Image: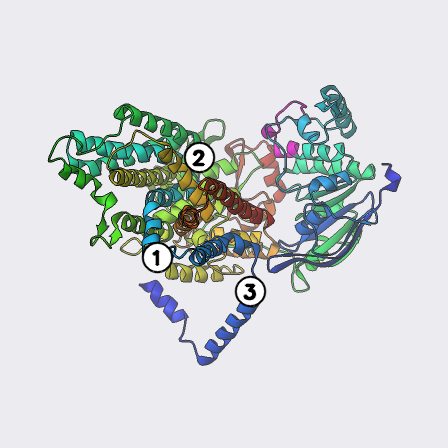
């Protein structure tokens, strides 16, 4: 309150002359503005994204339709949710390779709970499972001081192992035995397969993805917690000396990543109608999420980055698949293009870093 | 390559631009063979940039840089090395996991059929060491060496590849007095063997003692190049800061007689601190003098909760505080500005605003937990302007500022709330004279407003100039206490343990 008054008092109402001077200064600044290497690093990704978007709009009549764009979001919502959450971990100077394991085990446990206990417990079960797995990662990295890369690589193995043990290598499909179970199956698949407001509405999954992205963007950019994450990723010792309880914040980022991956796993299981015994797609989820983070321009060493960058990264990776399908290009070139794009994006980032 | 051929370095109209600022502008210079040529200037004057250009680390944007009368365009420092030019940077560039010998010959290993010829390397190393009179354990890992010894390794590295021109950027900033003397002897020996030394330094007394020629830089431009014999510290300072500037002076604060704010009793840490007790009153500045490694930084860190302690109590305003973490210390009203702003202080990629408000960022959170960024920017700007940080742009990255301004930002972090106790470890290291004076004024102001201040500095003059009382620490124990303005010699003797001083 007092600060607002002070700043208002210190800043008297601008006179016309003041305003004129300010406009002149603005014009001068605009004229002096040059595109520099840092701008390419910071905003190049947006330009490339828009270019891809325009290119596909021109090349394919189907691309710029509501259905296709919703579909783009729909099919990338699980990776997107995990990627947005793992951005917090990465900005905090850590790494999480276990997202795939959390993802698949949470989905499976949801299905298992639905079959063996109660269909309604399936949803909280997946989230709790994700949370607990994230907590395990966080404790390994902070309290036991295991390198995050190795800790989550190892925990990922364990999560996939538990998944195989519980599933016995088979799909677990709620509502697959006997009559009347169709009701249960419908409940289980509701959130993954349905749209809000009927046939032509927006998929629930898309809404969840968008809400989570916005929420995490706000958390990272506009809260004390977010600021502390940047501080820890940028200079851990300085953050500690500034009174930050570093371990707590780091654990929280892992828990959020675990929770989000659990949610993504739940959505995937709901979409498929069953919990899976682990497949290559789920294994690739962690890498896809990290790739999206890096592609968006978030520093893999921590301390800088943003959720909106990750969203762009996710959508670009999605655009490649979508574009290849629409243009009828052979599937197997996709990964080459994706890999190449990531290398180029990261290389530009570090080249610019070295020059400045 | 015979010594007689060694030709000078020549720069004509050299300029270098970083983003929007001109680091160097139209600098012309000749450096003669077998001389020690010093580059002096305030922070941001361009002396390091010039050193890096001569050392082949960066290339000038404009002008001509000639070595042996030929224009030199080095793509990498390795190319420069091939031409006999070596750069010893401020941050040493050694491989910590390799031994002394392996580092010395890194990249120029004697080879036989593609394999390293170890025997020949050992002989060459023995030869080098004998030639230069260094005492260095050949097989010690470089990571475990003291900074001074690492510097010796760097110098051996330079001479191992027959460097005729060696650029040293602030080589003594982390050395003790004795180590500095040793380094100077080495430099004289190098000069005697016709090597050319380019010596970039803040320390004017060293420059005058050592150099043959001095070039003074100001705001990227060359003020003059003159024989060192014609210069004095005063004339160099005048050159660095223009006509208006004068040699730095310390204001003498009045005696503080307030009540005790900080009371430390029986502080111990195995092998580091030995039963340290002292107190600081309201508005009092206490200087902590001691050699590097005497425990002065460790004492500061212990009080600030940065390192654990084995025993002892800390009271703030009469209340005993259990300080286990920096968070506890901050809670108790203790602020700590650490020795290394880059390593322990600043968040280089973050904005000035984020850096400034980091400790007290909670005060900008609304009821919903969202930060009011506009209000944060406004408060930051006001604070930075009051500290004359240039530019006071809250959204700028802190890495874009000069060292002195960075240090002010680090100070600003603790000024959102008036701290009860302020612990300063080398508050003016690597800071130019103007920023230094500003920081000294700030310390005085904070004391006048009632803070209890503990200040550490390697420069004894600074400690003596500011402090109301001086404690001398040696081997982790406080060995002597002086009232205001003690004779410098007495403090030095106590720090070195020369007198029969006891606690």
Q: Disc 2 versus disc 3: distance between alpha carbons?
A: 47 Å
Residues indicated by labels 2 and 1 sit on the same polypeptide chain: no
Q: Nearer the viewer, residue A193 or A138?
A: A193
Depth check, mark 1 against mark 3: the one in front is 1
Q: Is residue A309 above or below residue A288?
A: below
Q: Position of residue B343 (x, y in %)?
A: 51, 42
What is the spatial separation of the Cα atoms under label 2 and label 1, in whole angstroms? 61 Å
Q: Position of residue B225 (x, y in %)?
A: 77, 55
Is label 3 in a helix, a strand or a loop? Answer: loop
Disc 2 crowd rating (10 Å Cα; few below 14, some 14-19, many 20+) is some
Report whether residue B50 is seen.
yes
Identify the element where label 1 is drawn. Answer: loop
When asked about the image quadrant of residue A137, the answer is top left
- Name the residue carrying label 3: A33
Chain of the residue where label 2 is placed in the rendered structure: B
Q: Is residue A138 above or below residue B375?
A: above
Residue lying at the far left of the rendered structure: A180
Chain letter of mark 1 equals A
Which dot, 2 or 1, sits closer to the camera?
A: 1
What span is in magenta?
A: B136-150
Tell me which numbered mark, 1 or 3, is placed earlier along the sequence: 3
Quadrant assignment, res A236:
top left
Q: Quadrant of the N terminus of chain A?
A: bottom left
In-image side of A312 versus A35 (left or right): left
Q: Position of residue B16 (x, y in %)?
A: 67, 56
Please tell me whether residue B142 belongs to the stretch shown in magenta. Answer: yes
Secondary structure at badge 2 equals: loop
**Looking at the image, is A2 positioned above or below residue A69?**
below
The quarter of the displayed image where residue B153 is located: top right
> Residue tagged by mark 1?
A65
- Whether residues under marks 2 and 3 lie with C-beta atoms below 8 angstroms apart, the answer is no
Give the residue at mark 2: B307
């Amino acid at each position: 309150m007092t600060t607002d008054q002070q700043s208002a008092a210190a800043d008297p109402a601008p006179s016309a002359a003041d305003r004129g001077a300010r406009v002149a200064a603005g014009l001068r600044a605009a004229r002096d503005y040059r595109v520099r290497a840092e701008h390419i690093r910071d905003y190049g990704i947006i330009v490339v994204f828009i270019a891809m978007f325009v290119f596909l709009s021109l090349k394919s009549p189907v691309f710029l339709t509501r259905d296709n764009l919703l579909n783009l979001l729909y099919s990338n919502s699980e990776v997107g949710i995990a990627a947005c959450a793992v951005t917090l971990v990465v900005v905090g100077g850590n790494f999480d390779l276990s997202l795939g394991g959390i993802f698949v085990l949470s989905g499976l446990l949801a299905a298992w709970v639905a079959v063996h206990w109660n269909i309604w417990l399936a949803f909280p079960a997946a989230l709790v499972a994700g949370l607990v797995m994230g907590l395990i990662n966080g404790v390994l990295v902070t309290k036991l001081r295991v390198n995050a890369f190795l800790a989550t690589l190892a925990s990922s193995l364990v999560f996939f192992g538990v998944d195989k043990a519980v599933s016995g290598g088979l799909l677990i499909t709620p509502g697959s035995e006997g009559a009347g179970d169709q009701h249960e199956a419908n409940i289980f698949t509701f959130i993954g397969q349905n749209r809000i407001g009927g046939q032509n509405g927006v998929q629930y999954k898309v809404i969840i993805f968008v809400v989570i992205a916005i929420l995490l963007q706000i958390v990272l950019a506009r809260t004390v917690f977010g600021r502390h994450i940047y501080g820890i990723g940028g200079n851990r010792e300085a953050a500690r000396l500034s009174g930050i309880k570093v371990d707590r914040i780091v654990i929280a980022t892992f828990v959020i990543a675990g929770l989000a991956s659990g949610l993504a796993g739940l959505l995937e299981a709901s979409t498929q109608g069953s919990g899976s015994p682990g497949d290559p797609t789920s294994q690739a989820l962690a890498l896809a999420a990290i790739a999206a983070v890096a592609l968006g321009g978030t520093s893999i060493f921590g301390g800088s980055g943003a959720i909106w960058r990750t969203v762009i990264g996710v959508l670009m990776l999605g655009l490649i698949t979508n574009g290849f399908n629409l243009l009828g290009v052979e599937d197997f070139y996709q990964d080459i293009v994706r890999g190449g794009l990531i290398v180029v994006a990261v290389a530009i980032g570090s080249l610019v870093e070295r020059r400045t | 390559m015979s010594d007689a051929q060694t030709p000078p370095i020549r720069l004509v109209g050299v300029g270098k631009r970083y983003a929007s600022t001109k680091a160097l502008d139209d600098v012309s210079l000749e450096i003669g063979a077998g001389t020690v040529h010093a580059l002096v200037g305030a922070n941001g004057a361009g002396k390091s940039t010039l050193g890096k250009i001569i050392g082949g680390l960066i290339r000038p944007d404009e002008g001509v840089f000639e070595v042996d009368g030929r224009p030199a365009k080095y793509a990498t420092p390795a190319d420069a090395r091939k031409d006999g030019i070596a750069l010893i940077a401020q941050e040493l560039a050694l491989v910590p996991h390799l031994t002394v010998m392996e580092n010395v010959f890194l990249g120029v290993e004697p080879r036989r059929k593609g394999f390293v010829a170890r025997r020949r390397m050992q002989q060459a190393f023995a030869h080098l060491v004998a030639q230069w009179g260094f005492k260095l354990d050949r097989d010690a890992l470089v990571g475990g060496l003291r900074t001074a010894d690492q510097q010796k390794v760097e110098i051996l590295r330079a001479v191992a590849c027959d460097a005729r021109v060696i650029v040293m950027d602030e080589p003594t900033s982390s050395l003790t007095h004795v180590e500095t003397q040793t380094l100077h002897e080495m430099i004289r020996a190098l000069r005697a063997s016709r090597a050319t030394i380019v010596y970039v330094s803040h320390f004017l007394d060293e420059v005058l003692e050592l150099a043959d020629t001095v070039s003074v830089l100001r705001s990227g431009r060359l003020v003059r190049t003159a024989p060192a014999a014609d210069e004095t510290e005063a004339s160099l300072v005048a050159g660095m800061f223009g006509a208006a500037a004068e040699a730095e002076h310390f204001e003498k604060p009045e005696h503080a007689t307030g009540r005790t704010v900080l009371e430390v009793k029986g502080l111990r840490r195995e092998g580091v601190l030995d039963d340290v007790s002292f107190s600081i009153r309201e508005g009092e500045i206490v200087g902590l003098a001691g050699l590097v490694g005497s425990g002065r930084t460790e004492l500061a860190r212990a009080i600030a909760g940065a390192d654990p302690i084995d025993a002892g109590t800390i009271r703030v305003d009469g209340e005993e505080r259990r300080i286990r973490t920096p968070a506890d210390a901050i809670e108790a009203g203790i602020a700590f500005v650490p020795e290394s702003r880059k390593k322990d202080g600043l968040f280089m990629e973050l904005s000035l605003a984020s850096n400034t408000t980091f400790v007290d960022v909670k005060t900008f959170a609304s009821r919903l937990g969202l930060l009011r960024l506009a209000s944060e920017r406004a408060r930051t700007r006001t604070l930075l302007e009051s500290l004359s940080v240039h530019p006071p742009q809250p959204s700028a990255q802190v890495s874009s500022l000069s060292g002195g301004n960075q240090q002010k930002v680090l100070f600003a972090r603790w000024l959102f709330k008036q701290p009860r106790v302020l612990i300063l470890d080398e508050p003016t290291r690597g800071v130019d004279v103007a920023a230094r004076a500003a920081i000294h004024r700030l310390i005085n102001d904070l004391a006048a407003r009632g803070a209890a201040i503990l200040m550490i500095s390697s420069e004894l003059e600074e400690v003596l100039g500011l402090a109301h009382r001086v404690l001398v620490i040696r081997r982790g124990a406080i060995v002597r206490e002086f009232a205001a303005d003690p004779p410098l010699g007495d403090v030095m003797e106590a720090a070195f343990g020369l007198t029969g001083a006891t606690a």
